[in-house]
Structure formats: C-alpha cells, structure tokens
Amino acid sequence: MGKKGLLLIGHGSRLPYNKELIEVTAHQMAGMSEYLIKCAYMEKSTPNIEQVLAEFKKEDIDLLVVVPLFLAKGVHVLEDIPLIIGLEMGSCRGTFSVGNGRTIPLVYAEPIGKDPMLAKLMLKNAAAALKTYL
C-alpha cells in the first residue's frame, strides 16, 4: 500500500488549549508513523472536517483513515462524523474520491474507549496531583 492519510478529528472549543492538544497529538503521531496527518474539528474551531477533506483530495494518498480523538461513542462519533465523511451509520468502511479521479478506501476508527492505557494515564495524573499536595 502506498501513502496513507490520517484525519484526526477533535471536538473543538473556543478555548485555544483544545486545538493545541489536537495539533500536538497529531505532531507526535506523525513522528511515530508514516501517515500524512491533518487535523479537523467538529465545531467551534477551524478547520472543519469538510475543509480538511478538501485538502486531502489534493494529496497523493492511497488510503484515508479517519480517527476521532474522542473518549467515547456519542452523537458526534456515531452520527455526525460518519455523515460528514460519507459513511452509513454503523459502517466503518467507505470510499473517498481524490482529485485525480481515483477512488480510495476510507476507514473510520473507533474513539479511545476502554483502553488500559487510559487507566494508566489517569493514575499518572493522580500521582502528579498528589505530588502537589504532599
């Protein structure tokens, strides 16, 4: 398989920290992978998903993976994002048309969910909070 694109989607916020967190995460992911990674936001931040999908149409990619940086399956993950990226609700596979007339596979990933790494991260944060108390 050739070049792979990854669209990392955050919720968005009027506060700058949310956008910064998504962008820093994307930058860290890019350093660990060979994906071409771009960020988009559901609301209150730019660019939105449609704008970044338009950017991906201009890229020479052979696959697009859409990853919601959300903890759980809610309305955005289950309904809004699939609608925007052209998937039927409940589906995780579709296609994406790139600018040169090719149709490539599109894969929709799960949110973070019940991952043991999340539990470890919360324990790390609890330990850091205790250090400020002790």
Image: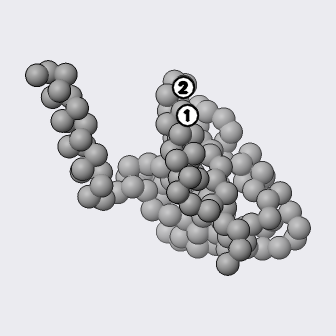
User: Position of 119 compared to 98: left or right?
Assistant: left
Q: Where is residue 77 drawn, in percent x and y?
A: 48, 54
Q: Which residue is mark 1?
A: 19
Give the residue at the far bottom of this rendering. 1
Instruction: Judge whether residue 76 can be spotted in this image.
Output: no
Against 104, residue 23 (above or below) is: above
Give the residue at the far front of this rendering. 31
Q: Which residue is mark 2?
A: 16
Q: Where is residue 22 drawn, in percent x and y?
A: 53, 41
Q: Are marks 2 and 1 in contact (CB under 8 Å)?
A: yes
Element on which disc 1 rests: helix
User: How many marks on residues?
Assistant: 2
Q: Residues within 10 Å of mark 1 (few under 14, many from 20)?
A: many
**What amino acid is labelled 2 in the image?**
Pro
Q: Where is residue 130 drawn, in percent x and y?
A: 15, 28
- Looking at the figure, which quarter contains the N terminus? bottom right
- Looking at the figure, which quarter contains the C terminus? top left
Element on which disc 2 rests: helix
Against 96, residue 41 (above or below) is: above
